[in-house]
């Protein structure tokens, strides 16, 4: 039996999760969360929070998430837009020195994808593509419990699949999925279409569509058509066994997920359309991903058996 600690060090809250791993299977022990420590003394405060959470239990290893760009070889944070004090630090090494527990850092998006693939909606499949729909749109291809990042670390950028036409994206291309479906872009497009100076959100667009607003419905129709095309592109390129869709926009399945999946099925030709399912682990996915990453490091293996207990 191995006790593993997951530390999801988010921009607002830090989530702590203790799990028991027996023969590659994970069992939940307990969870807690607290405001994220900030500033130069953040790692000291995080160590205090962690010791209090462990309450006498001795974890064999921990994983900690990083919101930003992480050098996986050195464990050093290159950039973190929301937590600048982490830049230049190796969070796992810093926390390990304070707790005297072996640790490993993992980028937060990677942690979420691994958790959903191994423990969540993709459980039981060896080949899973995880898609997160939010302000930005991210993707990750998880095979055998490990994320395939590509030769230069840029694989999975489904948000920037571009048709070469349409709205200008923040990346510089035109017609990217993110420019049509990203949370803030949906609201901005609805405002422009109505000729109003507002800061509408994706939720505002969905609520307007529910009230029968034709403009909102047209914008959502265009966005879900783009999502369907992107899903078909993923199927054509990597042929995943399961596609998992999470992120804030997945909380509006009637207006976003269901129409896109329906369109993908209707527009598929040669494509093998796999099960397309909603993510299951919610806000705790990052912490579970940190636990799985710690387990991989402890076992020296890239794959652990799927679990039924989370």
Image (cartoon, helix red, strand yellow):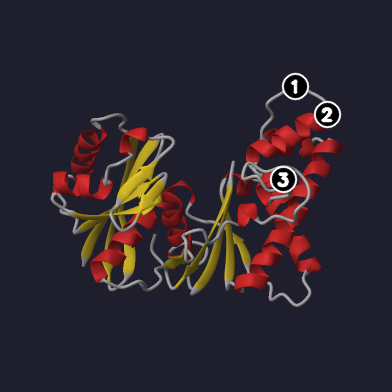
Q: Position of residue 107 (x, y in %)?
A: 40, 52
- What residue does disc 3 label? 180
Give the labeled residue for mark 2: 194
State the SS at label 2.
helix
Report the residue at 70% width, 33% height from top.
204
**How packed is label 2: few (under 14 Cα within 10 Å), some, or many (20 or more)?**
few
Distance from the alpha carbon under mark 2 to that under mark 3: 16 Å
Q: Quadrant of residue 233?
A: bottom right
Q: Which residue is mark 1?
A: 197
Question: Which residue corresponds to the image point at 38% horizontal and 36% vertical from the top-left?
Answer: 13
Frontmost of labels 2 and 3 is 3
Percent of width and height locating residue 186: 71, 39
The answer for how far apart the CA atoms under marks 1 and 2 are is 9 Å
Q: Quadrant of the C terminus?
A: bottom left
Q: Earlier in the sequence, mark 1 or mark 3?
A: 3
Give the quadrant of the N terminus: bottom left
Please tell me which of labels 2 and 3 falls first in the chain.
3
Residue in the picture at 56% in, 48% down: 247
Q: Is residue 2 visible?
A: yes
- Above or below, 214 against 250 in this view is above
* In contact (CB < 8 Å): disc 1 and disc 3: no
Decide if residue 197 is on the left or right side of residue 281: right
Residue 17 seen in the current view: no
Q: Does residue 46 lie above or below 198 as drawn? A: below
The residue that appears at 33% across and 69% down in the rendered structure is 25
Q: Position of residue 47 (x, y in %)?
A: 20, 40
Query: In this rendering, would 52 be left or right of 204?
Result: left
- Determine the secondary structure under disc 3: helix
Q: Residues within 10 Å of mark 1 (few under 14, many from 20)?
A: few
């Amino acid at each position: 039996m191995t006790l593993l600690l997951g530390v999801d060090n988010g921009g607002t809250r830090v989530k702590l999760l203790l799990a028991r791993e027996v023969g590659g299977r994970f069992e939940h022990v307990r969870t807690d969360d607290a405001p994220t420590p900030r500033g130069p003394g953040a790692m000291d405060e995080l160590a205090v929070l962690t010791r209090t959470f462990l309450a006498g239990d001795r974890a064999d290893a921990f994983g900690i998430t990083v919101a930003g760009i992480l050098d996986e070889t050195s464990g050093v944070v290159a950039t973190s837009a929301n937590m600048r004090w982490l830049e230049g630090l190796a969070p796992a090494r810093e926390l390990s020195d304070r707790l005297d527990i072996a640790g490993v850092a993992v980028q937060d998006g990677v942690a979420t994808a691994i958790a959903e693939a191994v423990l969540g909606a993709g459980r039981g499949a060896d080949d899973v593509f995880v898609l997160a729909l939010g302000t930005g749109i991210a993707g990750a291809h998880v095979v055998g419990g490990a994320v395939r990042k590509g030769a230069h670390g840029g694989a999975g950028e489904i948000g920037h699949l571009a048709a070469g036409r349409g709205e200008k994206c923040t990346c510089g291309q035109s017609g990217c999925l993110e420019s049509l479906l990203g949370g803030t872009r949906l609201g901005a497009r609805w405002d422009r279409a109505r000729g109003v100076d507002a800061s509408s959100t994706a939720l505002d667009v969905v609520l307007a569509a529910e009230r029968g607003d034709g403009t909102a419905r047209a914008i959502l129709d265009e966005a879900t058509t783009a999502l369907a095309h992107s899903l078909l592109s993923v199927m054509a390129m990597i042929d995943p066994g399961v596609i998992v869709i999470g992120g804030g926009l997945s909380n509006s399945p009637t207006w976003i997920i269901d129409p896109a999946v329906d369109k993908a099925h209707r527009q598929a030709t040669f494509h093998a359309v796999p099960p397309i399912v909603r993510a299951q682990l919610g806000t705790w996915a990052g912490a579970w991903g940190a636990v799985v990453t710690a387990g991989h490091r402890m076992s020296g293996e890239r794959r652990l058996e799927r679990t039924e207990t989370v």
